[in-house]
Structure formats: C-alpha cells, structure tokens
Amino acid sequence: MLFRTIAIVATLAATSPLAATAASAGVEKLNLRGGEVDHHSRLLLEEDYTFLVADIQYEDGVAAANRKLQGNSDFGRGNKPDQPEHTINVEDANGNIYEIEAGSGDTSGIGSGATVTLPPQAYRNPSGKIYLAGGALVEKKKKNRDLQQDGSATDLRRHLADNIGTKTVVAVRVVASGGAYNAATPAGLSDDVFGTGSDTFNLKSAYEGCSHDQLTINPGGAANGIVDGVVTITVDTAATSGNDGVMRNAVTDAIKAQFGVSHPTNIADHWMYCLPPGVMGGIAYAFVNSWMSVYSNQWCNYPSAQVHELGHNFNYAHSNEGSTNYADQSGMMGYSYSQDEGPVMCFNAAKSWQTGWFNSKRVNMNIGGSAATDNCFETDITGQADYDAALSQTILVKMNRSSGRDLFLMYNKKTGVNSGTVEGGNTVMIVEADGEGTSYGQSWLMAKLGAGGSKTFTNYLGDGRDLVVTVPSIGSAARVKIEFGDLCSTNPPTPNPTPAPVPPTPPPTPLPTNPPTPNPTAPPSNPPTPVPTNPPTPKPTPAPVAPTPPPTPAPTFPPVYKYACSKWEPAQSTICSEGSTAGGECSNVGTNNGCRKGGKSCWWASCPGGPPSPTPPPAPVGCTFCAPI
C-alpha cells in the first residue's frame, strides 16, 4: 500500500544530542552540508529510520451509544468529517517515535514499516515535530541478508505483521505528572487483555478464536519480572491535552531504563500504552506494521479497541462502507465499541484473506482467465466460525482482476466466535479492497446478500462484461454462484439436446414389439384360440403387471451412481445415459483421473434402476447431483 502526502511521525531518540543542536535558533538543525552540525547530529541523520503510519480513532458524542467514530483529517483527505486522521511517523532504532510536520516535504510512495533516511535540511521545530523543509524522505533499499544477523531492531520489527504463531504483549499503566491511567488495577487490566481472571472475551480470546488457534496471544515480560503481562510505568510528563507524543516517548525511555534493554521489543512483540484520560484527542491509535498501540484510559480495556489497534500492528487497514470510514460493522476493523465483553466478531472477507488463517480453504478466481473456475463458479461457502481443518470447505473467494481493487466474498455466519457481528449477520458479504489481500489496504462493503439475492458488478474488467454474484440458498452454508460475462452460458444448451435422446428411447421399444406380435400371431391363432384366450388374458394380466413394476424397482433396483467428465455441468439424464458407472475413481478432488485434464470436472448423478453402485458417493446437501469443489 503506498501512502501519499499525509501527516507523518518521526522517531528520534529523546535523549539524543539532537536536542541541543542549534538551540539558539529555536530549532534542532540536522543540516549535514552547512558545516554547523556536530558529529553526533551527523550520525543521527545518517542512521536508518522506520517509516510509520498511525491511524487515529475518535469518539463523537452525537453518535450512537457505545460506538466509536472517526475524526477529521487535516491533510490528504480533503477535510471530510467522515475520514480518519492519519499521521506519518519515523522511528529510530531505540523506539522513539516523532511526527513529521504535515506538508513540510515529500513522503509519497513509502509503505509503513519501510526503512528511510531524512533529508539533509530536516530539523525539529519548537513543537517537537520533524520539519522536512521541502525535502523528501528517501526509502532505503537494503541488501539481502539475514535479519537476525543484521542486529537492527527496526528490521526485525518489520516482521511483526505475521499473523500465525505466538505473539507476546505487554500492557502499560501510565502514571504521569498530574494524571494517571485509572480504568483498572494491574490485575483488572490483565484480565481485560488476557483473560487471566473471569473475563471471557478479550484480546487473547478474540485472536485465538478467530484464527482457530493459529495465532496465540500471550502475556509478555515474565522473564523480566512483569506479572501477567501488565506493568506500571511512571514518567515526569504533564498529563495535558495533546501531550501524548511526548508522553509515549517518555514511557519508551522509562521502559528501556527500568529493564536495561535497547528497545521494548527486546521484552515483548507488542506494547499497549494506556495513557491517562484527557491526554490524547482520540480514543486510540496504533502504528501500522509496527509494535506500539496507544489508548486513552478505559479504551485500553475494551476488546474491540484492543483487537482493532493490534490489527493495525498486524498491517490491517480500516473497513469502510460507502463514503464513511469504519462503517463496515461486520468485523473488528470497523467501529470500536465501549463494551467489556463484545461485540464477539472477527474480520471481513478482505482482512480474513490477509490473515492467512484460511489459505487452504479459499478460492482465487482470476476473472477473465482460462482456468475452469475463473469465470463460472458455484459452491457452498462455509462461515469462518465453522472452520474445521479436517473438512473440505470453501470459506473465502477472491474475484481477482489484473489492475484496480479486487472483490472478496464470505458467508458472515452469525455463530460461535462471530456470534456478535453487528452488521450483515447470516448474509453473503462482498467487499472491495486495495492491497491484493496481501498487504495494507482499506476495504469497502459492496453487498450483503440473503437467500435469493444477487449483485451485478458492471463492466468488471473494463471490457463491457459484467460480473454477477447470486445466492440461490442459505442454510448451514451459503450456496453461491459467480458468473462472468456469458462464459457460463454453455450450461443451458446442454439440457436441450439431452432430453431428445431420452424420450425417443421408450417409444421405439413398445412400437416395434407390440405390432409384430399381434400381426403374425393373430391370423393363425384367431380361429381356434382368440375368443377364449385373448380377452381373458390381456384383462387380468395387465392389471397385476401394472401395479407390480412400481413397487419392485425401489427395493430391487436401488439407484445407480454414474459419472461423466465435462467442463460444464451436464444434465442428470445425460450422465445416466452416457456416463460411466462410478466406482470411486472420481471421488477424490484434484486427482488426475481423466476428468481433471483440459479443465474438466467429475460430475455425479444418481440414476434409476440397475444394480447398486459398489462405492456410492455421499449425496451432496441440497442438490441431486453436484461436482465436488
């Protein structure tokens, strides 16, 4: 995800000799070429920094109760009241983060977590922000080498966005001059974050539940004497409005000094700074693809805020709807809520794709491509809460296009770990997203489809062809059909030629049989036998014969299972008349059994009459015959 010129936060050590540079001028000059900077400042300028984007959440008293609203952006978003505020930051190797003055220079084309250097004319202004003085941040391309050998904490922290494995977290109760975090005791905060007491829904339980135990969140710092993942840090910083930038750097320095480390990530992967009330303008913010999140007092205790902000650390962007940011309330990257035990929900389709938790249960449709499932696809979609590693399931579908935003689809089943989803419960939800589903990219809710619903995306590839998503039915899973252009139109013509050969088969059988029998037999037999024999025989015989066949086939001739190899689904009668008897050879998806060549699929049908199949396949739910997907 590339970020255009918006606010920036720069990380420079608070204890750096930079603070004393050019004090008489009221600024901290960093100019390397003017000859006025000492050796220490030159080293500071020449070192690497981590470029960080912070997303800030705001609360609006006019909004619905228990709902977080976003604030305004002063730059890059057109001052729209429904847009979130971003700041751009740089961080030094010691973990101190400073904001770059908005509009002071070029910060475009750089992703959060990248390594950058400052322009030579950059300096710190009296407000404590970095002023680029018309210069540009330069992204530094590093040589390929082992990051562990590099020894750079900045490089190592780039990999915090991994969403599988174990992450350690420490929550910090900040006590400042004139104010302190007061929402909970250390034990209470630990319970709200990690569930170490009686709390049932929290940061730990949410991520472990949504990931189906593929991501584990544990209290950090035990080896350093931190109890249950919570520590109280006291700083000599005024608890005044807007002082959060100074306070968070003071907290970082205090952590390093108290525990004797060069960076907080030497102790734990992620840190939550719980600031005193009234210090920051928003309710919470976090640095994207990084290690720190910051909260205003009690918002440190609410699970939706915790999951949302750690989501930014994991490189997730916001979930929007229409022109309103955060408005997709189906998952945790939308609004946050002032609730202690909810809402119990996970993420939308784009974010779920990005997590990597469902890699074995997702389908990537390369719209316009040549594969069998690229343009015409129908299957049952399982809700993410019903994930079962042992079952064959489809949970996510991506409708990929070569350029522009892609579409992502899921069944937002309202159950289990997703039982509290606020929007679109038990509907098929489609979102459009940047980032290809692999990197930071905002998403926009496009459709919520119930049973029988349909959504058309006109001119999807810009060539005049439409993409149509329909939901024939919803039960334990959602049946979904996706069609691009007229590439599914080969299915309708198939039934037409098929019924033709089936009806002609019964007629030719009776016609040639009945006439020839009476003609040759009637003349020679008429005189002696016809009168007494013919009348009584046909009348009593048809009666018992007619009722006998119906009951006999059911018990005597169970259904015959047959299969046919075809790119598109043939009619049932075609499979029964032209297919091969099924013996289990087509029951395994993906095997090269003749069907999988040339994009063909194996289609089953239950046919009447005949001996029972030696290995009948399981009957799909909701349809008589289906291709295994």
Image (tube, rainbow, N blue to C red):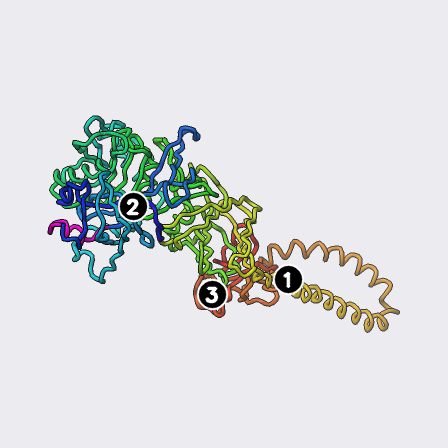
Image location of residue 505, percent across then percent down:
69, 67
Q: Which residues are magenta?
A: 37-49
Residue at image mark 3: 585
Q: Amino acid at mark 1?
A: Pro
Image location of residue 329, percent across then percent down:
43, 39
**Front residue of this view, candidates 294 and 281:** 281
Residue at image mark 2: 8
Q: Amino acid at mark 3?
A: Glu
Identify the mark nearer the N-term, 2 or 1: 2
Q: Is residue 553 visible?
A: yes
Left or right, 274 with respect to 364, comes to: left
Q: Secondary structure at mark 2?
A: strand
Nearer mark to the viewer, of 3 and 2: 2
Identify the mark nearer the N-term, 3 or 2: 2
Identify the mark nearer the N-term, 1 or 3: 1
Q: Secondary structure at mark 1?
A: loop
Q: Amino acid at mark 2?
A: Ile
- How many residues crowd mark 3 within 10 Å: few (<14), some (14–19), many (20+)? some
- How many residues crowd mark 1 within 10 Å: few (<14), some (14–19), many (20+)? some
Marks 3 and 2 sit apart, C-alpha to C-alpha, by 60 Å
Q: Is residue 389 a member of the stretch shown in magenta? A: no
Left or right, 162 with respect to 259, comes to: right
Q: Residue at 60%, 61% (x, y): give it.
A: 489
Q: Residue at 47%, 42% (x, y): give it.
A: 323
Marks 2 and 1 sit apart, C-alpha to C-alpha, by 62 Å
**Front residue of this view, candidates 352 and 273:** 273
Image location of residue 66, percent across then percent down:
40, 30
Residue at image mark 1: 495
Q: Is residue 48 a member of the stretch shown in magenta? A: yes
